[in-house]
């Protein structure tokens, strides 16, 4: 059997751990650090394996090296700078392949290979089987687990905090580090499972001297059970939370460590995926492939017990949360739209937020080094994952009433002199005041016309408002431009709107990105992002997601009233008074007939709550939503209007910020809106149930890996 790239990757990892170690090296003067310093920064110097296992300090820093390989979901690096492949700015976000976002950076894999349908198994997938450090993580985690007992117990002496209180014993620390290593390994396997289905899994170490080996792909069932088993072994040896009892200032310093809460949440997420229709069905999703025959991409049947197993994992989490507390949603300090927005924002942004169950970090703050930072590249339009009209339409009105583009036209564009009461985004009683009209989460996920350019973390809005109308200072001609053309019939020049959708700009759909940005950002205009020089962490698991996973499992297990109650927890936090049942009375969501529609409403809630988190991409795949892939998507044309004395309106194609504002003119309060179709994707207009579309539900394994013959079976359609 010939050698292969995976074998070479494992062999290099094994050899590297037998030689001086630069990536995980330590110096004799370094102190072991926990929390943010522990997770974010690798120390300097060199060491070999014997040196590492001879010291608690060096062993801790070895664990640091494994943490450094975690998935981080915001692009922030170049192509070949030693980071996870998925973190490259030239790969692209998974969610931009859904109906929520459109990518406007042609150099990404998502734009260049997914949008035009040219993706093949010869191209590295957005989450890489080889180059996202899955196998290095597994290798090093197994080494740590196998060798921790070699670390002298004298070095693992009982710790005390600054007041002399016992924190943990040496044996407890050893168990905890093993448990953390297991979680790091399980999380990497889970990332592959979410994108590929059944996968090969390392169960023991390789010496590095093997000339060949077999590492066959496991069935879907075996993959799921293996990941769950790893997590089950880790959970008893982890603290529920770092709430001050395990280390000084532990909330701030240790939030990025794996805990029992995080491990239980990941277990629930894996089981939720496993119970989903792509894997748990009486018929395989594609039809006729070797991967389906071998049960690598489905169980081979549908069993309700799989949903019940996922529900039990959610219930176990909630039971322990009731008993031990600590985790909770960040709550608003008042009842204004801004109060709700800041509560939602701080929930995922703050390092010490108690609604984040597990996060990953890559460097101290945005702008702290020569990296292709998320915010910085949003500002130059390269991280241009721009929201669509379809995404905007998922968000309800501010009381929870569903939004409907067709039925709500009077609210959207108004009529006659009542246009100032139109309220697609804001209602304008006069030129000095405005009232937000939609779900507060919408404004925190996308920047819309008329919103404040930024709102501080304390809730103070900027003086500038975002002008996304045609000719506005922030939109300019990025979305569209006004042309004067000759009309033969009228024998006069008339206005014509030319759709531009400029590439590499922050506003080409008529919206701008706000999640993980927190303020309009355009480097040429001067950015207003609140995240610049602020640490940007990636939320891997959160309490809002747990609530929605629990709601989904309850719905799938025929407990609709309970499902609606748990979904409402996130809606209550932002002031949506109507629950799903009240918001959609005609859909009978609490009846057996309304079960499938209730699940769809929960998926909609996931899109509204968990923007730019990969949730929509995974929901598309696990529910086989080919219709989300094939429907054309739209942007929003915004017009600033003048109300004329004769009762008519005319468009105004110029900025307000600048000469008009400086001259004392009233702030614009009249706007009108229309949709336009975005650039085509190859999938649009195709049969959503065709194999041509269904192949996209799972990523392709690299063809050269499949061809090596160590047991890797290709996914359907690739």
Image (tube, rainbow, N blue to C red):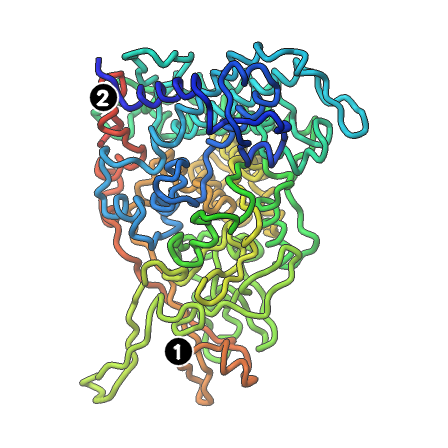
Q: Mark 1 points at which residue?
A: 653
In the image, 410 versus 695, the foreground residue is 695
Alpha-carbon span between mark 1 and mark 2: 58 Å
Q: Residue 296 is drawn in which quadrant?
A: top left
Q: Which of 246 and 684 is in front in this view?
A: 246
Q: Name the residue under label 2.
A: 290
With 571 as the anchor, is 690 left or right in this view?
A: left
* Residue drawn where x is 49% and y is 34% of the image: 552
Q: Nearer the viewer, residue 424 or 496?
A: 496
Residue furthest toward the left? 488
The image shows residue 695 at horizontal and vertical percentages of: 26, 35
Question: Which residue occupies 68% across, 29% down?
Answer: 322
| Residue 1: x %, y % from top left | 22, 13
Question: In the shown orientation, is residue 582 left or right of residue 707?
Answer: right
Where is residue 62 shown, x and y percent of the image? 53, 24
Q: Is residue 89 left or right of residue 590?
A: left
The total of numbered circles placed on residues is: 2
Establish if 335 lies above or below 258. Answer: below
Task: Residue at 57% x, 44% y: name it.
Answer: 348
From the top left corner, tell me how far across and down residue 675 is, in percent: 35, 63
Q: How crowded is mark 1: few (under 14 residues within 10 Å), some or many (20 or more)?
A: some
**Which image quadrant: the C terminus?**
top left
Can you see residue 271? no
The numbered mark at residue 562 is none
Mark 2, secondary structure of its residue: helix
Q: Residues within 10 Å of mark 2 (few under 14, many from 20)?
A: some
Assign a secondary structure to mark 1. Answer: loop
300 or 63, nearer to the observer:
63
Image quadrant where residue 544 sits: top right
Looking at the image, is mark 1 or mark 2 earlier in the sequence?
2
């Amino acid at each position: 059997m010939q050698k292969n790239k995976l074998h070479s990757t494992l062999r290099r990892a094994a050899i590297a751990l037998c030689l001086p170690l630069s990536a995980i090296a330590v110096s004799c003067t370094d102190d072991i650090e926990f929390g943010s310093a522990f997770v974010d920064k690798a120390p300097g110097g060199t060491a070999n394996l014997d040196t590492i296992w001879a010291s608690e300090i060096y062993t801790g820093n070895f664990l640091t090296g494994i943490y450094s390989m975690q998935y981080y979901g915001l692009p922030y690096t170049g192509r070949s700078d030693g980071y996870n492949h998925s973190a490259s700015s030239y790969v692209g976000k998974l969610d931009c392949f859904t109906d929520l976002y459109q990518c406007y950076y042609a150099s990404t894999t998502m734009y260049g290979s997914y949008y035009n349908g040219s993706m093949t198994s010869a191209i590295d997938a957005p989450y890489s089987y080889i180059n996202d450090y899955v196998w290095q993580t597994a290798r090093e985690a197994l080494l740590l687990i196998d060798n921790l007992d070699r670390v002298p117990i004298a070095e693992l002496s009982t710790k005390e905090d600054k007041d002399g209180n016992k924190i943990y014993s040496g044996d407890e620390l050893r168990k905890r580090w093993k448990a953390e290593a297991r979680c790091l390994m399980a999380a990497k396997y889970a990332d592959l499972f979410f994108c590929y289905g059944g996968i090969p899994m390392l169960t023991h170490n390789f010496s590095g001297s093997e000339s060949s080996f077999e590492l066959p792909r496991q069935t879907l069932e075996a993959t799921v059970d293996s990941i769950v088993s790893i997590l089950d072994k880790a959970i008893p040896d982890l603290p529920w939370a770092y709430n001050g009892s395990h280390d000084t200032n532990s909330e701030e310093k240790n939030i990025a460590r794996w805990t029992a809460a995080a491990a239980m949440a990941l277990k629930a997420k894996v089981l939720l995926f496993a119970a989903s229709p792509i894997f748990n069905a009486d018929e395989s999703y594609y039809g006729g492939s070797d991967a389906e025959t071998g049960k690598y991409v489905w169980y081979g049947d549908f069993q309700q017990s799989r949903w019940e197993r996922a529900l039990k994992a959610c219930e176990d989490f909630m039971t322990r949360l009731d008993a031990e507390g600590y985790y909770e949603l960040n709550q608003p300090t008042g009842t204004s739209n801004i109060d709700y927005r800041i509560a939602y924002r701080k929930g995922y942004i703050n390092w010490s937020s108690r609604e984040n169950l597990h996060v990953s970090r890559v460097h101290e703050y945005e702008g702290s080094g020569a990296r292709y930072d998320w915010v910085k590249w949003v500002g130059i339009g390269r991280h241009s994952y721009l929201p669509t009209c379809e995404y905007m339409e998922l968000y309800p009105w501010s009381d929870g009433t569903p939004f409907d583009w067709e039925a709500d036209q009077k609210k959207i564009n108004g009529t006659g002199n009542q246009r100032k009461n139109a309220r697609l985004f804001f209602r304008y009683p006069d030129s000095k005041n405005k009232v937000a009209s939609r779900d507060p989460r919408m404004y925190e996920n996308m920047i819309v016309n008329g919103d404040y350019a930024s709102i501080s973390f304390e809730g103070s809005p900027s003086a500038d408002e975002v002008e996304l109308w045609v000719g506005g200072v922030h939109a300019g001609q990025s979305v569209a431009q006004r042309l004067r053309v000759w009309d033969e019939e009228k024998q006069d020049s008339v206005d014509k709107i030319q759709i531009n959708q400029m590439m590499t700009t922050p506003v080409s759909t008529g919206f701008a990105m706000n999640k993980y940005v927190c303020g309009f950002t355009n480097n040429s205009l001067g950015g207003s992002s609140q995240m610049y020089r602020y640490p940007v962490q990636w939320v891997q698991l959160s309490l809002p997601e747990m609530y929605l996973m629990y709601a989904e499992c309850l719905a799938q297990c025929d407990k609709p009233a309970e499902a609606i109650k748990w979904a409402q927890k996130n809606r209550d936090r932002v002031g949506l008074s109507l629950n799903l049942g009240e918001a959609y009375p005609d859909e009978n969501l609490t009846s057996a007939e309304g079960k499938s529609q209730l699940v769809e409403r929960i998926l909609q809630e996931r899109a509204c709550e968990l923007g730019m988190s990969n949730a929509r991409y995974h929901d598309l795949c696990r529910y086989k939503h080919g219709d989300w892939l094939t429907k054309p998507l739209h942007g929003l044309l915004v017009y600033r209007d003048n109300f004329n004395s004769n009762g008519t309106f005319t468009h105004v194609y110029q900025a307000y910020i600048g000469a008009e504002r400086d001259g004392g003119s009233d702030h614009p309060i009249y706007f009108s809106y229309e949709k336009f179709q975005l650039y085509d994707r190859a999938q649009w207009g195709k049969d959503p149930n065709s194999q041509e579309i269904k192949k996209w539900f799972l990523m392709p394994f690299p063809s050269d890996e499949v061809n090596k013959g160590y047991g890797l079976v290709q996914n359907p359609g690739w």
